[in-house]
Amino acid sequence: MIDVSAYLGHFAYRQLRHNTGSSLVRLMDRFGIARAVVSSAASITYRSPQSGNEEVAAEVEAHRARLIPFAVLSPAYAGWEDDLKICQEQFGMRGVRLYPNWHNYKLQDPRCRNLVNAATERGMTVSIPVRVEDRRQQGWLIDIPDVELSEITDLIRACPKARFIIQNASGVAGSALGRRDNGLPENYAFDIARMSVEFGNEIGNLLAILGEDRLLFGTAMPFHYPGLPLAKLDMLKASSAVKEKIRSGNAERWLGVQAQQ
Amino acid sequence: MANSGLGQISRRSFGVCLGAAGAAVPLAAAPAPKKVKVIDAHSHLANHSNPNWATADRQLIDAADALGIDQLICSILTPQRPALPTGFRQCNDWVAEAMARYPGRILGYCFVNPGFAEEARDEVTRCIEKLGFVGVKLYNDYVATEPVVRPIIEQCIRLRIPILHHAGHTYWLNASQPRISDGGTFAEVAKQYPEAMIICAHIAGGGDWEWTVKALRNAPSVFIDTSGSVPDEGTVEMAVKVLGADRVLFGCDMSMTASVGRIRSAELSTVDRNKILSGNIERILSLRRA
């Protein structure tokens, strides 16, 4: 399995366990996860996210075969162009994660499109976590809403050459992103972390609408328990071939990596 | 490393849970699995104002089948707040019908609004003594410490039944639930009524779960259920560490895969896991039967 939605490091508002390279790999072993895309949890709240990218680069060094680093960048923060170059060329990061609501910008911001286009020119994937924490959990200092799916839709439309992974989303099947013939480029995929199977069956509906190539396995570990999306896959009424695509095949193609190195 | 508890839960009794740790512990190498009963201590059936209620209830049972949940303790809430006596009686009648439709599979919580003192008292009596319900469900009509709730608490103590109480602790005004209770509320109630068996609902769907667990540390008669959609790693482990495994009950509150995934993932001993999956709630329910 390839987990497209994992993290390393500390988070400002809650202690995370299994958040070092070694401990995350042990957690992955327990759940049969071969490789995981990781980015800095600290960069979500650092003013300069590059500091967190440096931490992740150091942490993954001993686990390059298992952990695939992504950068966290903000187009609203000075020097992101330099940081992007360093992240890709020196740190070997294969994608960029964006947190518009935590970093105080809009996805429609021209600076954001510039960042997405710059990452795309470098062959990097752009990942957008819709939610970091459930809003009910958030402490007294913050009240950060989920990223609106309509904002993501506009960005996808504006950046047809980019390759997007949308993390921790739900309600997709009721949005333009989950509609057939929506006029959007087929350059986006979703992780299943927060999608339902038991009621409404969002995963099944998206398989029917978007096809079997655009759903990915993602846990958001160690923020989240890894077993939740595994339980969803267990319940999903789909062929073993389709489940295998969700577990790893789609991520292999989307990220240009192999599940086993 | 493999989770020590997973190997003891059979596919039959708890879905395909071994898939979670399958790479680490091949099933063939494990000892013969021992069946562990799984009881969802916090579930709901569909209100019949929903024209698709029968389908929704069937989906609930299908999900329970797929995930290896043996029994579900259910209530139905009125859509309107405050709940009126005609409404909560109707809801409880529907639960009783479901108990007959799915015998042994669905158990009932009697939902009442304590603000209607006489009607609530009579309804609890009817549901427990005539219809075979196993507990009471209270929502957010009143904070649990309000005097109007005391007669229901005292009645449940006499009947030796638990109260599953809606709860949440958030830092942002929840305008739709001005009278929501939280772990601190239940700790206060427990001081006054240490014999009461209160279940603090959905630790994984009631805001800051770390706050809730800490608020209940010194309230040994209060239980928590593990239900909810919030997938935060470490929730169950912290509850067990702070409260002890004897006070933690497995529940889903309709977030079936999230709640099953949560308990499958949690690092627990086999003994503790089995207590959470069914042992604790069976112990609570046995007090009434005794």
Image (spheres, helix red, strand yellow):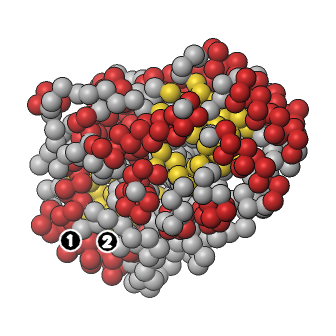
Sequence order check, earlier mark of 1 and 2:
2
Amino acid type indicated by mark 2: Gly
Res B105 visible: yes
Name the mark on residue A59: 1
Which residue is at a point 73% across and 61% down the rendered structure image? B145
Residue A33 visible, this orientation? no
Q: Is residue A247 left or right of residue B24?
A: right
Q: Nearer the viewer, residue A86 or B71?
A: B71
Residue indicated by mark 2: A9
Position of residue B272 relative to residue A143, above or below, is above
x and y percentages locating residue B89 in the rendered image: 82, 30
Give a yes or no on whether discs 1 and 2 share a subunit: yes
Q: Is residue A121 left or right of residue A145?
A: left
Identify the subunit bearing mark 1. Answer: A
- The mark found on residue A112 in the picture is none
* Observer-nearest of B45 and B138: B138
Residue A232 image offset from top left, x and y in percent: 42, 36
Q: Give the percent coordinates (x, y) of residue B96.
A: 70, 22
Which of the two residues, A78 or B275, is positioned nearer the viewer here? B275
Residue found at x 75% / y 47%: B152
Q: Residue at x 46, y 52 (%)?
A: B247
Q: Is residue A178 above or below residue A6?
A: above
Q: Quadrant of the N terminus of chain A?
A: top left
For label 1, the SS is helix
Q: 10 Å neighbourhood of mark 2: few (<14), some, or many (≥20)?
A: many
Task: Return the residue nearer the eye: B69 or B197.
Answer: B197
Q: CA distance from mark 1 to mark 2?
A: 9 Å
Neighbour tally class for label 1: few under 14, some 14-19, many 20 plus, Cα within 10 Å: some
- Mark 1 and mark 2 in contact? Answer it, CB < 8 Å: yes
Q: Three-letter amino acid code at disc 1?
A: Glu
Determine whether the residue tagged by mark 2 lies in a helix, strand or loop: loop
